[in-house]
Each structure stands twice: as structure tokens, then as C-alpha cells.
Amino acid sequence: MGRIVTKSIAIIGEGETEWFYFDSLRVACRYPFKVAPDFPQHSDIKHILKLVESYLNKQYDYIVCLFDMDRLFQFPSEMQLYQRAKKKYGAKKYAGKVMFMSDIIIHL
């Protein structure tokens, strides 16, 4: 019998809504993933980007970041950080490993 290969996926949600959505999906469908952080405490982009680096250092296979674009539009400095980070993690080094999703895409 072949060895089962597992992948680690960190899902980093910016707010409570995203956390509840993915946690209920995990429970209802019995998916073996962990929503990170355990429960969102800081919704600022600096904290989210620290978590991305932390999960990269922990060798996660994939990191999905969910962002509330309304919040980013309210705080131009956070929007600038978001755009820089999106460019950084979109580079070849991280291609397919770190993904940024916005609530605009999620709601479509």
C-alpha cells in the first residue's frame, strides 16, 4: 500500500466572518485543515503578513490569505502594504505557495 502524502494549508482570515466560514466548512465536510490564527485577534495587515512569514518558516505547503477590501480601502497605508505584499508573494519564489484572496472574489 502506498504512502499517503499530506499537504499543509494555512488559511489566514482577516476577520471573524472568514474564520467562521472556513471553520464550519472544515467541520461540516470533515476536512483536515486548520484555520489560522485559531481565532482572529488582530485584523491589521501587518499581523497577517507576520503570520504568512511564520507559516513559510514552518514549511507549510500553501498559505491562503483572505482580505476584506473595504478595510483596505479605508486605510491607504494598509492598502499600500497589501499591494507590496501581493507583488512580493506573487514572485516566482512563492508562485502557487502564497495566495491572496479578497472578499470581492469570495462573494462572486
Image: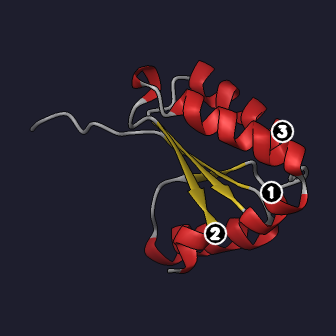
- Which marked residue is nearer to the observer: mark 2 or mark 3? 2
Kindly identify which residue carries mark 2: 103
Crowd around label 1: few <14 · some 14–19 · many ≥20 (10 Å)? some
The residue labelled by disc 1 is 72
Q: Tag 2 or tag 1, which sits nearer the N-term?
A: 1
Where is mark 3, residue-wise? 47
Q: Could you say whether the residue bearing mark 3 is in a helix, strand or loop? A: helix
The answer to whether residue 92 is above or below residue 23 is above
Residue, x 59% and y 51% (percent of image)? 34
Taking the image as shown, residue 88 lies to the left or right of residue 36, namely left
Q: Residue at x 73, y 64 (%)?
A: 68
Residue situated in front as seen by the camera: 1 or 96:
96
x, y percent for residue 4: 24, 39
What's the residue type where badge 2 is placed?
A: Asp
Could you tell me the amino acid type at mark 3? Answer: His
Question: Mark 1 and 2 residues: CB-CB less than 8 Å, in contact?
Answer: no
